[in-house]
Image (spheres, rainbow, N blue to C red):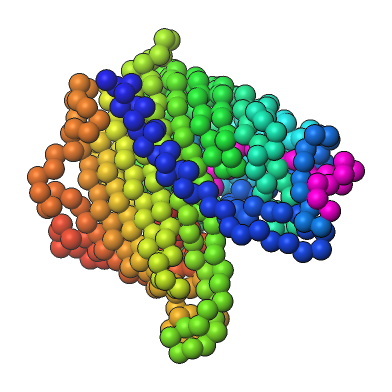
Amino acid sequence: MKLILCTALLLTVLPFAANAHNISSLIASENVLIREILPVVDTPLTDSISKTDDTLVFDLNNGFMPKHRRTHVFSNTGIEPSRQVSYIENASIMDFNRVTGYFLGLGSSGLQDIGPHEEIGLGGDFGYGFASKRWEYRMNGEFRLPLADVKKIEHDTTLKHLVISPPTIAIGGGFHNITSTDDDWRAGRLENAVEAFLAREDFRDYYKLAGWDGYLAFRPMHNTELNIEWRSDHYQSLSQTVFYGRWGGNKVLRPNPPIMEGLMNSVVVSFQREGVHTKLRTVSNIFGDSVDIEQLAGRSTLAQIEFGHMPGSDFGFNRYLLDQREFHSILHGLSIDSRFRFEATTGDTPPQKMDDLGGPGSLPALYDKSLTGNRLLLLNTEIRFNLAMLSAGFHAPDINLIIYNDFGKEGIAGSGKSIFQGFGFSGVSSIVYNYGVGIGWTNGLQVGASWRTDIKADPRWMVRLQRPF
């Protein structure tokens, strides 16, 4: 039964992923080839000189191009975890938190592509925590194998030439000894470091993660991936070494909680699709003035099942996760964006796998991690109105008035319960609801306030360096 539920969870998101790949009209100019225009995504496209003689690319003026004028081949490099993180977030050259203190690192952000067809990806980094007095490192790599001849043609808007993206299988893995967290979806590393340093607010909990992983990934198109992975990690609690920020006031950083230590072996099945892009348009506002506006459009999906009942493991649990983010530009200057997140853990849930609500990125009017359980439902919505539609005096195309509505439900269930049980719904009043208002940029800084509705409380003010989702 569990296997059926697991399969159903993944299959649910596949139709949404297929619709996210929108193809627009063909464009032609001097010495420009037929192009499939795809959304501009967070992951930059890369290129390499093609040596594939049987690759056929059509030129509007000259028909199929001769071999010496063939274009470039792109093998999928997967999804850079910029919006959603499925395992370990990208490395950082600089960090500050209550466990490592100042951290300085050196290495690559994501995989660096090498080979004539970018068939090899290699990455690695190392760094030192000055308060924890500990070196950290990781190395990873993969080999890519295209499954067919050229099927997709993508447009590199920076270099203005074609790159080709055939369906690809990747075999990879790596090893690591790092300070890690499960809270990357709440606050990004850079934003959290600034908050901890300046405002004495560290919104993430940390533990030591030392081990290795290996995976087999199928990438049918750019920024889409189905991944089966083996993880073998030793989890260890980390002592808090920093209790105060480094800027003003006497506020104490909250304690870093202990975790359940031991070896965790698990098989993880993940589906991920990143189809969000930025739309920049020139339109007329309500007074007829010509203005530029910027809006997000598209969908971002992460569906994951972690099977933790594995030989040699000190833990026994299964964990289910679905994170679906939608960005809809309803009218010129008016957008409705949303995130739906579902988490459930069955079996003996270790503390580091518990599901928490409260604080930035979840229910902002509550204090950080006010609600804890092994069942989580979260719906965040934003109504964004571009201020340039009201006045051409707002010269920036991405300043928005934002109305927030956040709904959350936390529950706890015994080990024998279904992943859909244990939420304890008892009417609308059992759902925690926050509302708020703010000003923010399309892809960055936001300032606003959020109010609770379950109890009478003062609003909580928020200064975010990134979007909540």
Image height of 348 relative to 372, above or below = above
Q: Residue at x 54, y 43 (%)?
A: 81
Question: Farthest residue toward the bottom?
Answer: 287
As drawn, the residue found furthest toward the left would be 426
Foreground residue among 201 and 426: 426
Q: Is residue 47 left or right of residue 188?
A: right
Magenta part of the protein: which range? 62-84
* 82 magenta-colored: yes
Q: Is residue 351 visible?
A: no
Residue 395 picture quarter: bottom right
Which secondary structure class fits the magenta region best? loop
**Left or right: residue 346 compared with residue 163:** left
Expressed as whole percent of the image width and height from the top left, the position of residue 382 reads: 36, 62
Q: Quadrant of residue 468?
A: bottom left
**Residue displayed at 22% across by 27% down:** 418
Q: Is residue 469 visible?
A: yes
Looking at the image, which residue is at 54% across and 57% down? 277
Q: How many marks?
A: 0
Identify whether 290 is placed above or below 216: below
Q: Residue at x 72, y 46 (%)?
A: 163
Farthest residue to the right: give it.
68
Is 355 magenta? The answer is: no
- Answer above or below: position of 25 versus 131: below
Residue 217 image-quadrant placement: top right
Give the quarter of the figure containing the N terminus: top left
The foreground one among 371 and 44 is 44
| Residue situated in front as seen by the camera: 176 or 330 | 330
Q: Is residue 289 left or right of residue 453?
A: right
Question: Percent x, y for residue 323?
Answer: 39, 43
Residue 187 % position (x, y): 44, 50
